[in-house]
Amino acid sequence: QVQLQESGPGLVKPSETLSLTCAVSGYSISSGYYWGWIRQPPGKGLEWIGSIYHSGSTYYNPSLKSRVTISVDTSKNQFSLKLSSVTAADTAVYYCARGVDTAMVYYFDYWGQGTLVTVSS
Amino acid sequence: SYELTQPPSVSVSPGQTASITCSGDKLGDKYACWYQQKPGQSPVLVIYQDSKRPSGIPERFSGSNSGNTATLTISGTQAMDEADYYCQAWDSSIPYVFGTGTKVTVL
């Protein structure tokens, strides 16, 4: 069974960089699939942040692209998110997920439990 | 940018059928999927590629997609189906576009 677990600080100061890691178990990232980050502000809907392939190929939401970096560490079977220059608007539950991305078929089939990140001084 | 619009809420009586719509320009030309999210939990994929059910998802969940509208249908709705539901599709501008979300209430 594929499992994903997010970890990282729950509180980040404005203008600083949010950093999260997603540890994957039950499946080797090197075997394929895309691996993504999605966020959900309190009481609001879902927003895709970006995704990475095991090779390191990335693609990002254009609205966040200038501030987002996603990287992968296949030796640790994990991938990471960095979001710079955060503001209160970046307060959200952040999820990592496994993404299917083939021939116009795009969806996330396994999700982590999510981690709340609050941006506040 | 591409947008997917859902009704904010849908109410249904136990045992009846709930239909949740997702509207977007030429959505029928794309593949849609649906997620169920219960309070405090992560989203769960219930339909992918318009009408396919992942392993473990009850048969009462079904999907269709044509024209500008994708529809998630819950037949014989149960109290446990009360949740928020999100559609999602691909667009050339952004590969994972989520709908606005629909709260399903089982009265």
Image (cartoon, helix red, strand yellow):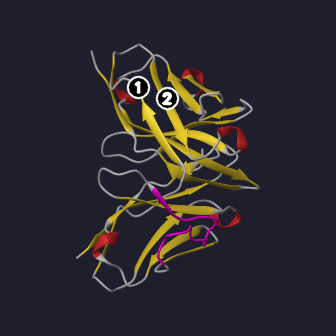
Q: Earlier in the sequence, mark 1 or mark 2?
A: 1
Quadrant for residue B14, please give it: bottom left
Q: Main secondary structure of the magenta part?
A: loop
Q: Is residue B70 above or below residue A68?
A: below
Q: Quadrant of the C terminus of chain A?
A: top left
Asked if disc 1 and disc 2 are in contact, CB closer than 8 Å, the reply is yes
Residue A90, x across and y down, in percent: 40, 29
Residue A75, percent across and down?
Answer: 65, 27
Identify the residue at horizontal 58%, vertical 46% (top origin): A98
Q: Relative to A80, does residue A51 appear above or below in the rendering? A: below
Q: Is residue B32 left or right of residue B106?
A: right
x and y percentages locating residue A86 in the rendered image: 42, 20
- Depth check: give the residue in front, A7 or B41: A7
* Amino acid type, residue under disc 2 in the picture: Thr
Q: Which mark is residue A8?
A: 1
The amino acid at mark 1 is: Gly
Q: Are marks 1 and 2 on the same chain?
A: yes
Q: Residues within 10 Å of mark 1 (few under 14, many from 20)?
A: some
Q: Which mark is residue A21?
A: 2
Subunit ID for the residue under disc 2 = A
Q: Secondary structure at mark 2?
A: strand
- How far across and down, in percent of the image, does residue B55 sit? 55, 68
Which residue shows up at 36% across the image and 23% down it?
A: A9
Magenta-tinted stretch: B44-58
Q: Which label belongs to residue B14? A: none
Question: Of B41 and A44, which appears nearest the observer?
Answer: B41
Q: Is residue B56 magenta?
A: yes
